[in-house]
Image (spheres, rainbow, N blue to C red):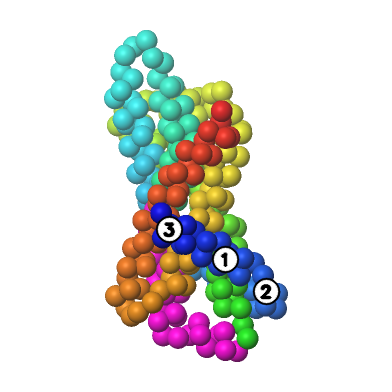
């Protein structure tokens, strides 16, 4: 319990340091643009592939579980749409990014710590926490909602292709199901969750890397901890936000 409280305290103290005494705006702009490409654009491929097959599986499983003739076939499209928007494109994508982006951040900052590059920045009077972590937080907060929207679109297209190709639903019924009783607030709900998850992934992973002590072995352990802790917090906040935003 004491260790948990100690780590929590160090985490919030690091966040305080991240958001205080910023460097020149031009420096942050350059770093943020770099992180947008490094953490954002480089994740488009894996999100696209996973979302496509995720939508396909959801459609086929919904179809095979609603074979009763009393269920209209357009429910397959409706179920695919709501499942992807409400849960899969935000939460599952965040868990994937926790593994890809989180481990990347933790290993990058951890390597800088063990090779004393962070100490060198501090010696030059640079706020190392703000310089290294803030651009990453801003980049993920800006780009992760784009990845979520991409995931929603690709997931629904994947469901449509799988459903029509397998012959479990016609194209007209699937499109009607996507449009049926659509609630725009669901998109807002998904975006809010995505922002929370993006902040969790970046800040927790940076925290693990920033306080690494030792060598390359400890950097590897920090990367593992970053993925595990980020994933657990994502699932926890998923429950909390769902209760707050949908109740």
Whether residues under marks 2 and 1 lie with C-beta atoms below 8 angstroms apart, the answer is no
Q: Is residue 121 visible?
A: yes
Q: Which mark is residue 155?
A: none
Nearest to the observer: residue 225 or residue 188: 225
Please tell me which of labels 2 and 1 falls first in the chain: 1
Taking 144 as reference, is 182 above or below it? above
Residues packed near mark 1 inside 10 Å, few (<14), some (14 to 19) or many (20 plus): few
Bin the neighbour count of mark 2 within 10 Å (Cα to Cα): few under 14, some 14-19, many 20 and up. some
Q: Residue 83, image x and y in percent?
A: 44, 33
- Front one among 186 and 161: 186
Q: Which residue is mark 1?
A: 13
Q: Nearer the viewer, residue 120 or 157?
A: 120
Report the residue marked by disc 2. Answer: 22
Q: What residue did someone put label 3 on?
A: 2
Mark nearest the camera among 2 and 1 is: 1
Q: CA distance from mark 3 to mark 1?
A: 16 Å
Residue 8 on image: x %, y %: 49, 59
Placement of 120 over or under 79, stated as above or below: below
Q: Residue at horizontal 45%, vertical 72%?
A: 211
Q: Secondary structure at mark 2?
A: loop
Mark nearest the camera among 3 and 1 is: 3
User: Magenta residues?
Assistant: 95-124
| Dominant SS type (magenta) | helix
At x 34%, y 44%, the residue is: 53
- Nearer-N-terminus badge (3/2): 3
Please give left or right for residue 22 compared with residue 49 in the image.
right
Q: Quadrant of the C terminus?
A: top right
The residue at the point 37 percent across, 68 percent down is: 222
> Disc 3, disc 1: CB below 8 Å?
no
- Tell me which numbered mark, 3 or 1, is placed earlier along the sequence: 3
């Amino acid at each position: 319990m004491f260790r948990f409280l100690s780590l929590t305290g160090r985490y919030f103290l690091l966040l305080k340091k991240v958001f205080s005494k910023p460097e020149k705006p031009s420096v942050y702009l350059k770093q943020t643009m770099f992180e947008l490409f490094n953490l954002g654009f480089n994740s488009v491929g894996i999100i696209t592939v996973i979302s496509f097959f995720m939508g396909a599986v959801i459609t086929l499983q919904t179809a095979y579980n609603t074979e009763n003739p009393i269920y209209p076939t357009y429910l397959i499209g409706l179920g695919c749409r709501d499942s992807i928007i409400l849960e899969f494109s935000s939460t599952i994508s965040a868990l994937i990014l926790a593994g890809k982006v989180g481990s990347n951040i933790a290993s990058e900052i951890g390597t800088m710590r063990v090779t004393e590059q962070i100490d060198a920045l501090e010696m030059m009077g640079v706020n190392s926490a703000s310089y290294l972590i803030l651009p990453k937080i801003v980049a993920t907060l800006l780009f992760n909602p784009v990845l979520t929207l991409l995931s929603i679109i690709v997931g629904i297209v994947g469901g449509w292709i799988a459903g029509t190709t397998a012959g479990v639903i016609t194209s007209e019924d699937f499109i009607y199901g996507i449009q049926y009783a659509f609630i725009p607030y669901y998109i807002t709900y998904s975006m809010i969750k995505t922002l929370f998850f993006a902040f969790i992934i970046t800040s927790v992973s940076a925290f693990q890397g920033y306080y690494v002590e030792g060598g390359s072995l400890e950097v590897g352990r920090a990367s593992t901890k970053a993925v595990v802790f980020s994933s657990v917090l994502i699932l926890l906040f998923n429950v909390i936000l769902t209760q707050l935003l949908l109740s």
